[in-house]
Amino acid sequence: MAIAPLKSLRHKLTNEPSRWVLVAVVLQTVGTIGLSACTFSSTAQLGGNAPVSQAAIVTLRFSGWQSNPNEGKLLGQLLRDFEAKNPTIKVKYEAINSEYMDVIRTRLIGEVAPDVFYLEAFEAPKLMKSGVLEPLDPYITADFHLEDLQPSLLRAFQLEGKLYGVPKDFSTLALFYNRRSLAAAGISQPPQTWDDLLTVSKRLTIQKPGGSKQYGFGLAPELARQQFMIQAFGGKLVNQYGYAAFATPEGVKGLALVVDQYRRDRSSAQPTDVGATWGSEMLGQGKAAMVIEGPWSIPYFKETFPNLSYGTAEVPAINGKQGTMAFTVAYVMNRQSKHKQAAWTLIRYLTDKQGMKAWAKQGLALPSRRSLLSELGYDRDPLYAPFVKGSAYATIWQAGENLPTIRTNFNNQFVSALLGEQPLPTAMKRAQDTANREIYLAN
């Protein structure tokens, strides 16, 4: 029985589409997989502590990713602090910045996965169902204060009453706007409704001196940013059986707001249209006056565009409803870890109040402990407060184990409709049918 979950995962992953054709070859070189990965050992100087026998030291392998150098430095410091307080545990950390989940899945199949690793809510359902994660409930004690963690974030890592991950942080989406652009157009406040956003975007779309163009709005044409648009008029991303269900009139109605603005009004642009890589770069370069992004943009603007005068606001309401997305990542434990108690000690350290407080100070994401949102002042900070407010009604970026398949098909067809290659209802029907056919065959 102990190896049945692993066999199940191996069957699922090696029978997915072509991305797993080379898995056998990869397993032969699994020790060197992920060419962009970087590894560091955070062995601490124990100072005046009594010497610890090398035989008593446990070495944990820990994997995640790194969005910027500052994040890596902060995590390194946290791990050094952890080792200083836990001299019998050494942590070997590896940042995998390319094809992260492919690497993790392959290592799980090869039974060489790390003891602890990052897991996005988006990817969690399949791994939880496959049985390769260790349930954490037996390790959690009352003094960990599980009730302080955002309930919606915890639910993203629960299956059949068991908790498989502790969310380390989360991000919602909010509206960023260029204060000078709005003021120049005579606009006194950011739009409160989507109808207002469409109207304001037209006024903000201008030809600037020197020939460059500023669009009113910079859009991200991907499902992770459009799910709340599907839901705005009563649409659903998936049905009760986990199959794609977004191509209904209700779902298409919300998406049409995005497509019509881009094609008919010409008041929005994709990053690729203006030579940018993402929305906040568009805003910083003056190529869009408004974008919808996450709190990770705040440190980015401070470092890359320090002279940009901008503000944030909640995502404009659609059809009288507030909506946004929430993204979260948890620390999870490999069920095959040989050092489970030590692995939990690390997870607990990183997610208790003290460890999470040190991590959350960077401002890239929000702490998943509710007490820290207030203690660190995020709920009162003018730039961060809209993200905190959005957490009350945000849709978690998760929709069962078939979401990766649904996302790929949606993104391909939605961009096609955005470019005018086919009508939006046709594109969404094609995306839904293709996704559901692939899901059916995979099961």
Image (spheres, rainbow, N blue to C red):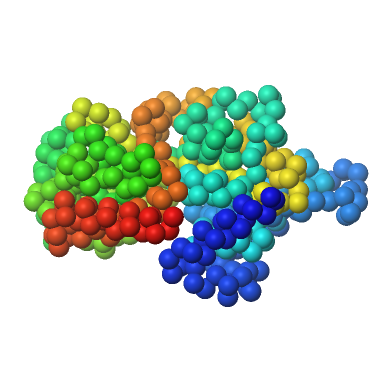
Residue 141 lies in quadrant: top right
Question: Can residue 145 be seen in the rendering of this structure?
Answer: yes
| Residue in front for this viewpoint, 212 or 246 | 246
Residue visible at 59% across and 69% down in the picture: 33
| Residue in front for this viewpoint, 412 or 262 | 412
Residue 339's spot in the image, x, y percent?
A: 76, 48
Q: Is residue 278 left or right of residue 135?
A: left
| Residue in front for this viewpoint, 113 or 50 | 113
Question: Can residue 364 be seen in the rendering of this structure?
Answer: no
Residue visible at 88% across and 54% down in the picture: 54
Placement of the C terminus among the 4 image quadrants: bottom left
Q: Is 240 placed above or below 24 here?
A: above
Residue 96's spot in the image, x, y percent?
A: 56, 60
Residue visible at 66% across and 69% down in the picture: 31
Residue 354 lies in quadrant: top right
Q: Is 323 placed above or below 438 here?
A: above
Q: What is the tally of numbered marks visible in this picture?
A: 0
Residue 189's spot in the image, x, y percent?
A: 21, 31
Residue 403's spot in the image, x, y percent?
A: 39, 50
Residue visible at 14% across and 60% down in the picture: 422
- Residue furthest out toward the left: 264
Q: Is residue 178 left or right of residue 100?
A: left
| Residue in front for this viewpoint, 262 or 313 | 262
